[in-house]
Image: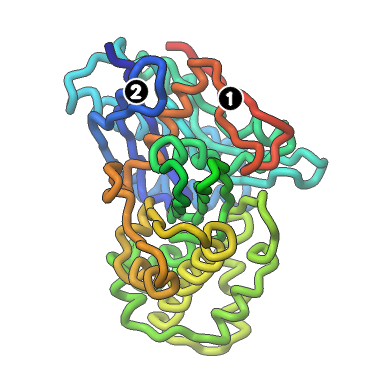
Amino acid sequence: MTELYIGLMSGTSLDGVDGVLLDLAPGSAQTLSVLAHEHRPLPTELAAELLALSTPGDNELHRAALAGNALTQAYAEVVRALLVATGVKAGQVLAIGAHGQTVRHRPGEFDGTGYTLQLGSPALLAELTGIDVVADLRSRDVAAGGQGAPLVPAFHRVVFGREREAVGVLNIGGIANLTALHADGRTSGFDCGPGNALMDHWCRENTGQAFDAGGAWAASGKVIEPLLAAMLGEAFFGLPPPKSTGRDLFHPAWLNRHLQANGRLRPPDVQATLAELTASSCALAVLQYAGTAQELLVCGGGALNHHLMTRLKALLPAMNVSPTDARGLPAMQVEASAFAWLACAFRRHECANLSAVTGAAGPRRLGALYPA
């Protein structure tokens, strides 16, 4: 007997929607198998609107509602593709874990609680697919005084943990986050800083391409050391965990302030410096919080950036740095699989946050159910 779940993820990189159909053995989240993976790029207009909604603007409530509906249509398309690819019927899937699109993330701020905001319409997704939807996965942790992120370390422990061995897992999406799986069984994790978000922005602005394929453009430039040092001076990097971040901090205006302070710069050199910012901030986090690990597994779009992976290996010479593919779960399937697993945890009435990671007051059941 199988238990089937779908996980959907659209991250801060805004490159598209990833979906997986996951088979989780009954009674155990430790035994899982990815039956299918589908990716659909976001329509250009939708990606631009989601990016614009990450900063204050005119008529936000109306625009956000419609953008959420449009994103949900993209989610439903991925769900349909997964079912067609496997021959599975909607009624056989127990739930969809739908993350939504984060456009604001300000936990603990303003009134002591703060908020995290993901766009999407889980009610519409349930209507379009005929499958139960588990969504709003971050806000309960925030309500309990946590950061609401990262949520994936518990899943990383299940999939990548090794008894009496320390392992690091680095997810490089729009924002980068680190999970430290300690040899004594403890799990810690936090957001490191920018992943692909600033690199993708600079690439779009200067080449018209959505991203720097393989990091080839960055590799053609030279790191601007004063610019790198200034950016690494951002206070966030020195904060102790628990901590999380997003486009609320690492946005184009933040980059422009640093660029203006450094005079006229060659675009490929800026790209090389942004790649080094990601590699350096991630490597510093790994050395400080997962320094005993001999293995660093990398997932997310950054794992496909050859230049970035080369820099990580150079900065972490004592570690075996490789994509998660080497451990049986391809780099582009990890986060979507994590949200399928979170939907499973919700259905099983299990707490899925790690208060040691997020800073929440304690274990909490994450999500809200939208029945088909």
Point 45% across, 46% down: residue: 11
Q: Decide: few, some or many residues near mark 1? Use Cα within 10 Å; few <14, some 14-19, many ≥20.
A: some
List x then y, in percent, for residue 58. 62, 48
Between the residue at mark 2 and the residue at mark 1, the CA separation in whole angstroms equals 17 Å
Which sits in the foreground, 195 or 74? 195
Q: Tell me residue 353's x, y (percent).
A: 59, 33
**Mark closest to the chain's N terminus, 2 or 1:** 2
Q: Is residue 232 above or below residue 11?
A: below
> Where's residue 363, x and y in %?
65, 28
- The quadrant of the rendering that contains the N terminus is top left
Quarter of the figure that contains the C terminus: top left
Mark 2 crowdedness (10 Å alpha carbons): few <14, some 14-19, many ≥20: many
User: Is disc 2 in contact with disc 1, using a CB cutoff of under 8 Å?
Assistant: no
x 46%, y 74%: residue: 276
Q: How many marks?
A: 2
Dot 2 falls on a residue whose secondary structure is: strand
Looking at this view, is 219 or 331 the one in front? 331
Q: Secondary structure at mark 1?
A: loop
Name the residue type under label 2: Leu
Q: Nearer the viewer, residue 287 or 150?
A: 287
Name, please, the residue furthest toward the front.
164
**Left or right: where does residue 260 sit relative to residue 211?**
right
- Residue at image point 29% right, 28% down: 21
Above/below status of 135 relative to 9: above
Look at 28% across and 30% down and name the residue there. 33
Q: Which residue is mark 2?
A: 24
User: Looking at this rendering, what residue extends furthest in the right direction?
Assistant: 111
- Image quadrant in which you'd find residue 354: top right
**Seen in the image, is 370 located left or right of residue 117?**
left
Residue 271, by quadrant, is bottom left
Instruction: Give the numbered dot on residue 351.
Output: 1
